[in-house]
């Protein structure tokens, strides 16, 4: 496979695995969730290796508001993923069995809980900042975005509006502001609807950051 094609598949895999991880209580919190977590870690590692030149250029060139936001979010995302991975490994019962005291478990669970939701939001922002970069590897998607098609714009707008509703319905505000120590799931809700809710939230956040801070490319 060509390098650009591999990156395309990697981007899709990262988003799909992330959405499945957010649905942990609906699709299983045992070995499946832990296995997905390890897969996510490996995918992130591959992503970092593929984009290692970005990290090497951190102290080169000038900084404007756009670049500052980009670096801040990328560093925050890297820290959040590390925290989520370490806390997940410490709580593991199946893939990487651990012996851990109950008091420690409570603290680590909270860290994992809050970090996971922040990683989700920052990951969406990260994608929004890199929309032109990503679409550069998807010619069909790039042409669609550049065509200013009113139907496409309408669909994206509807998804964003629904994402705002899903943000409220899924109580993300409570998790991101550390109000709720537990994730509340509607167990009568179909898994596919839950995944679409989170996908819509992801698109909403990505669209906001693309609109205000996205990396712009000519052509």
Image: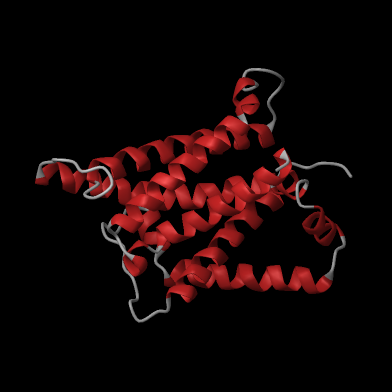
**In the current view of this chain or complex, which residue is farthest to the bottom?**
188
**In the current view of this chain or complex, which residue is farthest to the front?**
1
Q: Which of 7 and 83 is in front in this view?
A: 7
At horizontal 31% and vertical 47% (from top left) the residue drawn is 112
Q: In the figure, is residue 8 to the left or right of 170?
A: right
Quadrant where the C terminus sits is: top right
Quadrant where the N terminus sits is: top right
Q: Nearer the viewer, residue 104 or 67?
A: 104
Q: Which of 199 and 29 is in front in this view?
A: 29
At horizontal 62% and vertical 54% (from top left) the residue drawn is 206
At horizontal 40% and vertical 64% (from top left) the residue drawn is 23
Q: Position of residue 49 (x, y in %)?
A: 57, 30
Q: Nearer the viewer, residue 124 or 47?
A: 47
Q: In this view, does 129 lie above or below 55?
A: below
Q: Where is residue 29 in the image (x, y as percent from the top left)?
A: 29, 60
Q: Where is residue 114 in the image (x, y as percent from the top left)?
A: 34, 50
Q: In the figure, is residue 156 to the left or right of 12?
A: right
At horizontal 70% and vertical 30% (from top left) the residue drawn is 64
Q: Is residue 211 above or below residue 25?
A: above
Colour scheme in use: secondary structure
């Amino acid at each position: 496979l060509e390098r650009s094609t591999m990156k395309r598949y990697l981007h899709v895999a990262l988003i799909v695995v992330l959405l499945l991880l957010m649905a942990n209580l609906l699709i299983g919190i045992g070995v499946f969730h832990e296995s997905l977590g390890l897969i996510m870690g490996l995918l992130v590692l591959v992503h970092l290796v593929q984009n290692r030149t970005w990290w090497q250029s951190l102290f080169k060139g000038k900084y404007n508001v756009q670049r500052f936001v980009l670096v801040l979010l990328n560093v925050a995302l890297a820290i959040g993923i590390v925290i989520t991975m370490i806390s997940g490994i410490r709580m593991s019962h199946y893939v990487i069995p651990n012996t851990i005291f109950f008091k420690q478990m409570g603290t680590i669970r909270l860290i994992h809980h809050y970090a996971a939701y922040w990683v989700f939001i920052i990951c969406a922002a990260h994608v929004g900042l890199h929309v032109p970069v990503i679409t550069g590897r998807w010619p069909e998607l790039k042409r669609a975005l550049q065509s200013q098609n009113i139907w496409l714009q309408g669909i994206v707008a509807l998804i964003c509006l629904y994402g705002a509703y899903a943000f409220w319905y899924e109580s993300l505000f409570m998790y991101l502001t550390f109000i709720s120590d537990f994730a509340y799931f509607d167990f009568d809700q179909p898994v596919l609807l839950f995944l679409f809710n989170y996908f819509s939230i992801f698109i909403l956040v990505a669209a906001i950051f693309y609109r205000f801070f996205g990396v712009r490319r000519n052509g």
